[in-house]
Amino acid sequence: MQRKFVAALALGLMATTSSAFAQMPKFANQGVTDTEIVIGTHQDLSGPIKAYGVNGSNGMRMAVEEINSSGGINGRKLRLVMEDVAYDPKKAVLATQKMIELDKVFAMVGTLGSPTTLAPQPNVLAAGVFQLFPISSAEFTYQMDPAQPQDRLKFATSQPYPEATKATMREMMKRTKATKPCVMYQDDEFGKNIYTGFMAYMDEAKMKPASVTTYKRGAAEFSSQVARMKADGCDLVFLATIVRETIGAMTEGRKMDFNPVWATSAAANVQDVITLGKETVEGLYATGLYETPYEDLATPPVKAWIATHRKIFGGDPNTQTIYGYNAIMNFACYAKMAGKDLNGATMLAALESGKGCADIFGDKPLSYSKDNHLHALTAQLHQIKGGRWITLSRELQM
């Protein structure tokens, strides 16, 4: 079902055929020597979503160490250049320019955030550098225009926010029997993608939201939005928020004795929401793409991975660690598939070959084609119960 949906989405949004992308993009063909491959990423290591960036970057470093200690990629060591952009799109543009022009990266891999990936994306593609597996579910990370061959340089591994949100809302309404659903979203590319999915469900159900509120990226105060939702009688609130915004909105709700069903996207499905929010966030529902790697529930390969993380970083990994780790491992898989003569053309051929790259976490192997540059991870439904993210559904109906 998921494959059929992705194919339909590709056809509907991009109107592509196998001949539509006959023109090859231009490639920078840089960052590859006889001894190493240089790739770049930008993360938030000091800003509002550093809980994401620090854990994701730890996963990336784990992957690089694992790859290099196992002989590298067809005999070449992998070098990762990482820049802290503090979830600031302007800083992301400058950092990306530096990595392309000075560090000569072959690809940008696993960049964090929708607004911070979107801002430098035109420069990345124009330079002939791959944009691979960003930690974002926004549609611009994979949509292609047949008139723009450089679009073939971007590949995504996620479940798009609009489709995942629509599926989550459908399941939440079925479970809760809510009659006055509402949405609060961050007023940027990230939030608007989720709002689109929320409204798609409203259209499907022939309903209108009881309340729609927004906030600016970086906001720390949500009393006016929550007061409005309470006044509008919301009994289910979908939050297009990240970590501190999720906690902030729910905290305001508790203060005002406003206790709807709270739900959110995969962006807030992180252990830090529980660690920082404590009992305030108990009961929160969220879309999930990976299950939180709790050791007592893990498979043997994941248990070994958790042990390695503890040895290196002194704590437990989370889902963001998985995103970062998989981004690098997926790059390595396709770069190895491209062969000893690694360049833009051979890498693109490997990525578009339809051959899969599997992970240790149980998702379906990656698979792309010339017409489809999205590998849609299976959308799940999770809920915080007893201080843990518990899986309620391992595959939502899309």
Image (tube, rainbow, N blue to C red):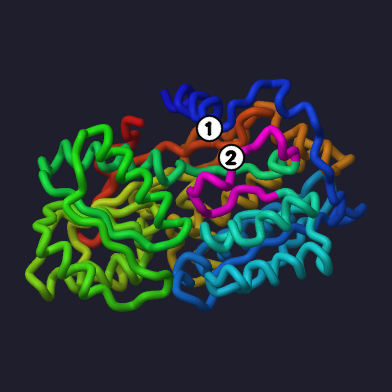
Decide if residue 159 is on the left or right side of residue 308: left
> Horizontal and vertical percent for residue 346?
82, 36
Q: Which residue is mark 2?
A: 143
For image coordinates 10% across by 64% down, the residue present is 231
Provide the residue span drawn in magenta.
Answer: 131-149
Residue 380 quadrant:
top left
Task: Name the one closer to the observer, 6 or 68.
Answer: 6
Q: Is residue 138 left or right of residue 192?
A: right
Relative vertical location of residue 10 with respect to residue 223 in this rendering, above or below: above
Picture quadrant where residue 93 is located: bottom right
For the N terminus, give its image quadrant.
top left
Residue 147, position in %: x, y? Answer: 71, 35
Is residue 83 in sight in this rendering?
Answer: yes
For the point 49% across and 24% down, which residue is it?
8
Residue 94 is drawn in which quadrant? bottom right
Please check the rendered image and state whether residue 83 is part of the magenta-colored stretch, yes or no.
Answer: no
Res 13 label: 1
Residue 384 shows up from this direction: no
Three-letter amino acid code of the residue under disc 1: Leu
Mark 1 and mark 2: span between their CA atoms?
A: 8 Å
Tag 1 near tag 2, CB within 8 Å: yes
Q: What secondary structure is found at the residue carrying circle 1? A: helix
The residue lying toward the viewer, choosing from 182 and 62, is 182
